[in-house]
Image (cartoon, grey):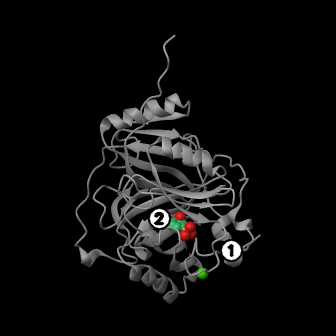
Amino acid sequence: MTERTFPPAPDVVRSAYAHLVVTDLARARWFWVDVLGLHVQYEGAGALCLRGTDELTHHNLVLTEGRVAALHHLAYRVRTPEDVDRAEEFFTALRRPVRRVPAGQGAPGVGDAVRVIDPLGFPVEFFHRIERGERLIQRYDLHRGAQIARLDHFNICTPDVPAAYAHYRSLGFGCSETIEGDEHQLYAAWMYRKQTVHDVAFTGAAGPRLHHLGVATHESHQVLRIADILGAQHLERHIERGPGRHGVSNAFYVYLRDPDGHRVEVYTSDYYTGDPDHETYRWSVHDDRRRDFWGNAVIESWYKEATPVLGLDGEPLPTSNSLLDESAVRVGADGLG
Ligand code: XXG
Ligand code: FE2
Ligand code: CA
């Protein structure tokens, strides 16, 4: 008998875009474009494709309208067209649901892709080819709202953070930071392919669910500015947590909720992780600075509420409860237990 070798993992470049289902596309357009300031790259056939000012590919976010607000899929860009085939072979060997999405049948502008339900239960796409958009970096006349530059990361809720960590290690991701219990129980982890703190992070909670999309600005004043813009229009209900400074990642942040409750984090000023010997920085779950460096409490909705995810057939996927619940750790500022 010949021994079966596991197919190589696709070479993932970065978290590239997310496709969200919203219940009212006009209302979502108001929030993501008019308020937050994402640039409209494509509008038509019930879909909206949006991107930040530094993004040179077609989009960072696809919005379509549906009955239930949900995550349609997360998408990673891979290095070469062959890496799309590698993704297909890799997830087929894992015996996960896999579907080929030819160019023209998936998101506007995206070439041949593979969609899978990954071992954590998330709908994930791997693509290489994508149309490019006009360079907007110095079109300052078009920069509005929070002046979003690009997508930074996905944050996903999963009941089994060690399993999520192992899966993303097998895809070649590094780990920049963790939150751990006294016996090194893993409550949360931040993992990357591009040379920043993360492309994906795991929140230990009922899942699979999408916790938030992280979008990057260049400077902390843009985080304050979007909070001011919302306050000025009596739209403070859209601000969920912050502004503040994270312990994990050191980034400056504010979390907003869109009209359907999808959460987005405006995020800036994390750090370089690209050296080959970059070490994981481990936070104790008892350190009150871990989630807000100034010790501000985390609101309960931030730990508990998240976006449901859809299977490859477009139907919502069931969730499992988490064994570990960070919000129940009775310590200092986050003592919600
Ligand atoms: O991007 C992030 C976060 O995952 O949204 C949360 C960086 C840090 C944090 S935390 O709340 O742990 O400081
Ligand atoms: Fe985040
Ligand atoms: Ca607050």
Image quadrant holding the C terminus, namely: bottom right
Q: Quadrant of residue 8?
A: top left
Residue furthest top in the image: 1
| Residue 149 spot, x, y in % from top left | 34, 68
- Residue 162 vs 329, above or below: the answer is above
Whole-percent x, y for residue 96 in the image: 55, 34
Left or right of 215, for residue 310: right
Q: Amino acid at mark 2?
A: Gly
Say which residue appears at 25% left-offset and 78% top-offset. Answer: 141
- Residue position for label 2: 214
x then y, percent, for residue 263: 55, 66
| Pick the front one: 305 or 233 | 305
Classed neighbour count for the residue bearing mark 2: other residues with Cα under 10 Å, few (<14), some (14–19), many (≥20): many
Residue under label 1: 334
192 to the left or right of 308:
left
Q: In the drawing, does residue 98 fall left or right of residue 207?
A: left
Observer-nearest of 331 and 68 = 331
**Residue visible at 34% across and 40% down in the picture:** 103
Tell me residue 91's x, y (percent).
50, 34
Give the secondary structure at mark 1.
Answer: helix
- Mark 1 within 8 Å of ligand 1, using the beta carbon: no
At horizontal 65% and vertical 56% (from top left) the residue drawn is 184
N-terminal-most mark, 2 or 1:
2
What kind of residue is marked 1? Asp
Seen at 25% across and 69% down, the residue is 137
Q: How many numbered circles does the render carry? A: 2
Mark 2 residue CB less than 8 A from any atom of ligand 2: yes
Q: Can residue 89 be seen here?
A: yes
Task: Say which quarter of the image contains residue 242.
Answer: bottom right
Instruction: Give the secondary structure at mark 2.
Output: strand
